[in-house]
Image (cartoon, rainbow, N blue to C red):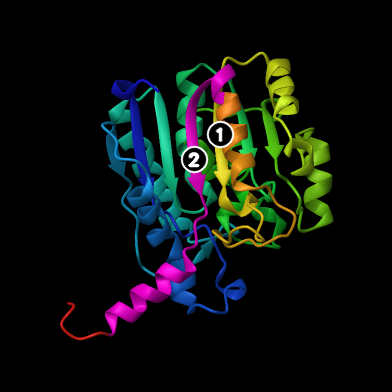
């Protein structure tokens, strides 16, 4: 990537995940805010960069209120506006995003869709399709609504401030293996969004590259939700659905795309560093450290 025109965005948004109930080994606050530590840990582990680094300011108030079918709506809306302003001020051509739950791709990807005049395709590498809508009333976490927001569907308030959208025929799910409910599987079919399973891409990336060619797009954004990874190899995210992709498969897919297309956006999202959270809590209890 051209370093002079690329920025790294640290986006520790956590409010879009309502995950405490499925992380019983952590306190509810630690489970909810684990994405904050996860985002900063990804930045710590990532190679040093000469690119401009932007950190999106995120509220740490644990008292989230549901509005418009979305938990933490007020904070998510204000953080969306703040993120868009910071990115627009930086005016990058390419963006690396380290999250944070899955909704951290919404602002950067819609910014890039506007910048490249909609000549863009999106590869969403994830165990789940993230096409919930607020009116579903089945799950109020905005991270499960990330793709529909990028399409321009969902909460009118949030959608109204996004700069552009990516249409359904320019979106491909990769690694998908858990629709969670029939409603989501039916919606994906209605939208016409194609998907590939972990098995479809386990040996090579040609089905992804063929799909990209069919779109005619020159530029690509890639979202990598760490729950796509096989929990038998590593548990790095909240989700632990069996039968996922191997680390080498994910990196191969992303690099194969980058060899053939102009990758202008890459997100790594949904880190939930369970061990690091427990170690942090341990250190907080020891004398002389503070």
Q: Picture coordinates of residue 171 (x, y %)?
A: 67, 31
Q: Picture coordinates of residue 88 (x, y %)?
A: 34, 29
Q: Is 276 covered by the magenta stretch? A: yes
Frontmost residue, 221 versus 89: 221
* Relative side of 153 to 63, left or right: right
Residue 203 falls in image quadrant: top right
Number of numbered callouts drawn: 2
Residue ID for mark 2? 267
* Mark number displayed over residue 279: none
Q: Give the range drawn in magenta.
A: 258-285
Residue 252 falls in image quadrant: top right
Residue 153 in view here: no
* Relative side of 87 to 226, left or right: left
**Is 69 located above or below residue 99 in the figure?**
below
Q: Tell me the residue at 45%/35% (across/down).
A: 108
Frontmost residue, 63 versus 189: 189
Q: Picture coordinates of residue 75 (x, y %)?
A: 41, 56
Q: Picture coordinates of residue 90 (x, y %)?
A: 29, 29
Residue ID for mark 1? 222
Give the position of the N terminus as an image quadrant: top left
Residue 44 in view here: yes
Contact flag, marks 1 and 2 (Cβ < 8 Å)? yes
**Counting residues from the N terminus, which is met first, the one under dot 1 or under dot 2?**
1
Q: Marks 1 and 2, how far apart in space?
A: 6 Å
**Is 233 located above or below residue 102 in the figure?**
below
Secondary structure under the numbered disc 2 in the rendered image: strand
Give the position of the C terminus as an image quadrant: bottom left
* Relative side of 113 to 196, left or right: left
**Is 284 located above or below residue 221 in the figure?**
below
């Amino acid at each position: 990537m051209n370093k002079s025109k690329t920025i790294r965005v640290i986006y520790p948004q956590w409010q879009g995940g309502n995950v405490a109930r499925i992380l019983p080994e952590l306190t509810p606050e630690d489970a909810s805010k684990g994405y904050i530590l996860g985002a900063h840990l990804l930045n710590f582990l990532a190679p040093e960069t000469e690119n401009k680094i932007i950190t999106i300011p995120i509220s740490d108030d644990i008292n989230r209120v549901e509005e418009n079918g979305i938990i933490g709506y007020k904070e998510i809306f204000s953080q969306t506006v703040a993120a868009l302003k910071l990115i627009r001020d930086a005016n990058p051509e390419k963006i690396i995003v380290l999250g944070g739950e899955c909704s951290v791709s919404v602002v950067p990807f819609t910014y890039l869709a506007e910048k490249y005049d909609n000549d863009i395709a999106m590869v969403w590498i994830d165990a789940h399709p993230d096409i919930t809508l607020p009116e579903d009333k089945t799950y109020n976490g905005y991270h499960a609504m990330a793709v529909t927001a990028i399409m321009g569907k969902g909460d009118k308030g949030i959608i109204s401030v996004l700069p552009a959208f990516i249409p359904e025929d320019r979106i491909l799910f990769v690694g998908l293996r858990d629709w969670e409910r029939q409603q989501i599987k039916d919606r994906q079919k209605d939208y016409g969004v194609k998907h590939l399973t972990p098995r479809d891409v386990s040996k090579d990336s040609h089905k992804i590259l063929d799909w990209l060619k069919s779109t005619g797009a020159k530029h690509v954004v890639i979202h990598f939700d760490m729950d796509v990874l096989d929990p038998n190899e590593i548990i790095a995210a909240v989700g632990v659905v069996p039968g996922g992709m191997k680390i080498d498969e994910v990196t191969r897919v992303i690099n194969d795309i980058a060899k053939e297309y102009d990758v202008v956006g890459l997100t790594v999202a949904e880190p939930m560093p369970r061990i690091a959270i427990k170690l942090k809590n341990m250190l907080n209890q020891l004398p002389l450290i503070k």
